[in-house]
């Protein structure tokens, strides 16, 4: 950790000032939490539900980060750092590399219940933090942070951001009970929690690191392709090798649009009926 990164981290952190939340802000949390828990009971992966329970995050109101950090620290050595909003990539990576999750403190307004562009405290605490209670996922997030700092140095940040997007934010996992959600962007979205598992239109493709790193994404609509892992160990193992040769290989290949399938894709659960959003193209056309 260079001195400048230490400064960047110090600058980005703020106080949550938990005692200053209004009754209206706690009421919006309750609304979001109760609605989402009803949807996630049979759609979120077991590790998420266990993490949420272990953290003791309740419907009663916006939790105090200090209390959550003490529980999280005891479980996997992670702590929550309050930040004002999206922080620069290098600051974000530097936090993750030190097992610090940068969480926003503000909560969305009532007229933003179903969508807001940037993360709020509901997305960060109810979406991201429960999985940090899982030791393998907690290690993946730290190795992702270390990889991010390196990717930045190599000029491949965009490809690593895709890996984060299609796993940490919008990842699905295959379980004996069926397809389940582990991506925070889905876990904190009422509409996408249903769409990602049950709508016939999006592609659902087995996770493959290079394929993910080549795939563009949109931030303003439900995903057109979801990548499915078998377990978190697969995700952690995928981030172990040095990415330099991987970046070199895929730099020679064209990006893949978010709505297409390529020949090498191994589709998950071929959709039962309904119009698929994607179109299959040959590798030559990519
Ligand atoms: N900042 N607070 C915050 N939360 C994020 O999820 C976040 C960020 N900055 C950058 C970022 N995510 C993405 O660019 C990651 O892909 C790095
Ligand atoms: Fe997020």
Image (cartoon, helix red, strand yellow):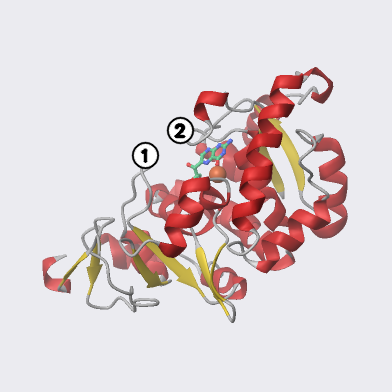
Q: How crowded is mark 1: few (under 14 residues within 10 Å), some or many (20 or more)?
A: few
Tell whether 228 sits left or right of 181: left
Tell whether 86 sits left or right of 225: right
Tell whether 285 sits left or right of 255: left
Q: Which of marks 2 and 1 is nearer the N terminus?
A: 2
Asked whether residue 90 is in view, the answer is yes
Q: Which residue is disc 1 drawn over?
A: 220
Q: Which residue is drawn at 62% across and 62% down?
A: 140
Q: What is the secondary structure assignment of the residue under circle 1? A: loop
Q: Which residue is drawn at 68% across and 60% down?
A: 48
Q: In this view, does 249 lie above or below 222?
A: below
Query: Pointers 2 and 1 in contact (CB under 8 A)?
Result: yes
Q: In which quarter of the image is ligand 2?
A: top right
Front residue of 28 and 78: 28
- On the image, the x and y values in percent for residue 72 come to 81, 51
Front residue of 90 and 101: 101
CA distance for labels 2 and 1: 7 Å
Write down the quadrant of residue 91 in the picture.
top right
- On the image, the x and y values in percent for residue 175 come to 58, 77
Location of the C terminus (image quadrant): bottom left
Write down the quadrant of residue 46 in the picture.
bottom right
Q: Residue furthest left?
A: 285
- On the image, the x and y values in percent for residue 98 come to 71, 48
- On the image, the x and y values in percent for residue 194 come to 48, 56
Front residue of 145 and 149: 145
Q: How crowded is mark 2: few (under 14 residues within 10 Å), some or many (20 or more)?
A: few
Q: Which labelled disc corresponds to residue 94?
A: none
Q: What is the secondary structure assignment of the residue under circle 2? A: loop
Location of the N terminus (image quadrant): top right
Q: Which residue is disc 2 drawn over?
A: 117
Front residue of 134 and 90: 134
Q: In this view, does 14 lie above or below 57?
A: above
């Amino acid at each position: 950790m260079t001195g400048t990164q230490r400064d960047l981290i110090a600058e980005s952190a703020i106080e949550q000032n938990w005692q200053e939340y209004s009754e209206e802000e706690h009421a919006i949390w309750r609304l979001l939490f109760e609605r989402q828990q009803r949807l996630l009971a049979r759609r979120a992966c077991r590790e998420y539900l266990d993490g949420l329970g272990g953290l003791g995050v309740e419907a009663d109101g916006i939790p105090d980060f200090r209390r959550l950090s003490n529980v999280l620290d005891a479980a996997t050595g992670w702590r929550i750092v309050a930040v004002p909003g999206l922080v620069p990539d290098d600051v974000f990576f530097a936090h993750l590399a030190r097992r610090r999750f940068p969480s926003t403190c503000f909560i969305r307004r009532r007229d933003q219940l179903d969508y807001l562009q940037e993360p709020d405290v509901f997305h960060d605490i109810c979406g991201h933090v429960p999985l940090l209670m899982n030791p393998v996922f907690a290690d993946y997030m730290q190795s992702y942070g270390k990889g991010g700092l390196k990717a930045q140095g190599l000029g491949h940040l965009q490809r690593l951001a895709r890996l984060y997007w299609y796993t940490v934010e919008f990842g699905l996992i295959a379980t004996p009970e069926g397809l389940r959600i582990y991506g925070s962007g889905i876990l904190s979205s009422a509409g996408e929690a249903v769409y990602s598992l049950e709508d016939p239109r999006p592609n659902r493709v087995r996770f493959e690191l290079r394929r993910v790193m080549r795939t563009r994404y949109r931030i303003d609509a439900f995903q057109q392709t979801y990548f499915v892992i078998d377990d978190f160990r697969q995700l952690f193992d995928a981030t172990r090798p040095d990415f330099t040769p991987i970046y070199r290989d895929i730099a020679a290949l064209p990006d893949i649009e978010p709505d297409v399938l390529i020949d090498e894709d191994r589709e998950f659960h071929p959709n039962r009926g309904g119009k698929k959003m994607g179109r299959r193209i040959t590798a030559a056309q990519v």
